[in-house]
Amino acid sequence: MTYVAADDRYDRMQYKNSGRWGLKLPAISLGLWHNFGGDRPLEGSRAMLRHAFDRGVTHFDLANNYGPPYGSAEETFGTVLAEDLRPYRDELVISTKAGYDMWPGPYGEWGSRKYVLASLDQSLARMGLDYVDIFYSHRFDPDTPLEETMGALQTAVHQGKALYVGISSYSAEKTRGAAQLLRELGTPLLIHQPSYSLLNRWIEPDLLDALEEVGAGCITFSPLAQGMLTDKYLNGVPEGSRASRNTSLSPDLLTAEAVEKIRALDDIARRRGQSLAQMALAWTLRDPRVTSTLIGASSVDQLDDSLGALQHTSFSDDELAEIDRHATDSGINLWQRSSSD
């Protein structure tokens, strides 16, 4: 049956400008890092993408290496776009990235002009697109001049293959440098995508200030700390979970100290009438400099639970103070090396 989007899809979602620029993003965006690769049934991915759009999620975030296998999340999205979402292309914000390893040899990762632009061409082919809305440098490359990487992003815009550009997991200093270079090239920095959660607050001391200075937005990823900020691990490691598979969440991160913090935060969430995951998502949006937060999903029900965070996004001063006592660094920032270069 032909897909027809829900008429009320914009009624329950909040939208916000990315920094000082005109592009608005939904408060919650859907990332395809997990659960949309070639190892998952297409119909499950299709159901989640359709339902997300029906709920007003207009932004779908990808990268060249999302899967598994690499590239397959873009292929999945391209199939659903062609069969279901193509009539709504101009209502969608589609992003992808280049930076991590994609093919063998010295030109298959990082930030050289050769890799960045070749990767974008491959991503467009996999998704069946003429352009993406946002194209990111996925990580800072310490061995390539920043001028070269930013110049490649500018070329993508000049060629009409991207409308806006962003960076991910860059330090505050490198963010300022990237924004300055892009400004000189005439292609402003739209957005930065850092990891951020109750257990990983590295962006607060410097990066958010830098983004405000340069006028860029912020879209946070891993707001649930790879699943730690759910009720899943309150009583051990369940079979089939990420930690049990030791994929994006190592069981070594679930220390007694970390679990104690999670339990305390879960108590606060319950008093607020939210699940821990809902509070964790709402908390990332409390700062006005944060444009959107990225969620993953493994089912339509999980997607709905996450979107339920938007029903209660305000926090009292007392709640924030209590959260701060437990929301401390837990050594889970897997992307620290990139953001410290």
Image: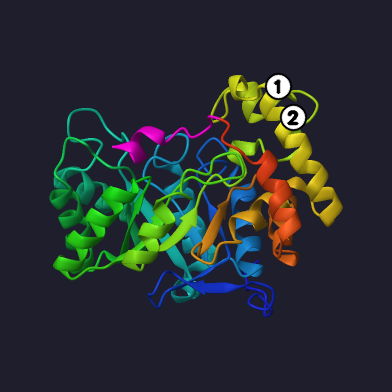
Determine the secondary structure under disc 1.
helix
Instruction: Specify whether residue 132 is in view.
Output: no
Q: Amino acid at mark 2?
A: Glu
Q: Neighbour class for label 2 at 10 Å: few (<14), some, many (≥20)?
A: some
> Which mark is on residue 196?
none
Mark 2 lies on residue? 260
Identify the secondary structure beneath mark 2: helix
Residue 116, how many percent across, how many down?
22, 47
Towards the viewer: 111 or 314: 314
| Residue drawn at x 63%, y 73% as measured from the top left | 5
Residue drawn 39% across the image and 40% down it? 65
Could you tell me which quadrant the C terminus lies in?
top left
Residue range in magenta is 331-341
141 versus 17 height, above or below? above
Pointer 1 residue: 256
Q: Is residue 260 left or right of residue 88?
A: right
Q: Are marks 1 and 2 in contact (CB under 8 Å)?
A: yes
Q: Is residue 315 magenta?
A: no
Quadrant location, the N terminus: bottom right
Figure label count? 2
333 relative to 57, above or below: above
Question: Is the image coloured rainbow, by chain, by secondary structure, or in one colour?
Answer: rainbow
Give the CA separation, mark 1 to mark 2.
6 Å
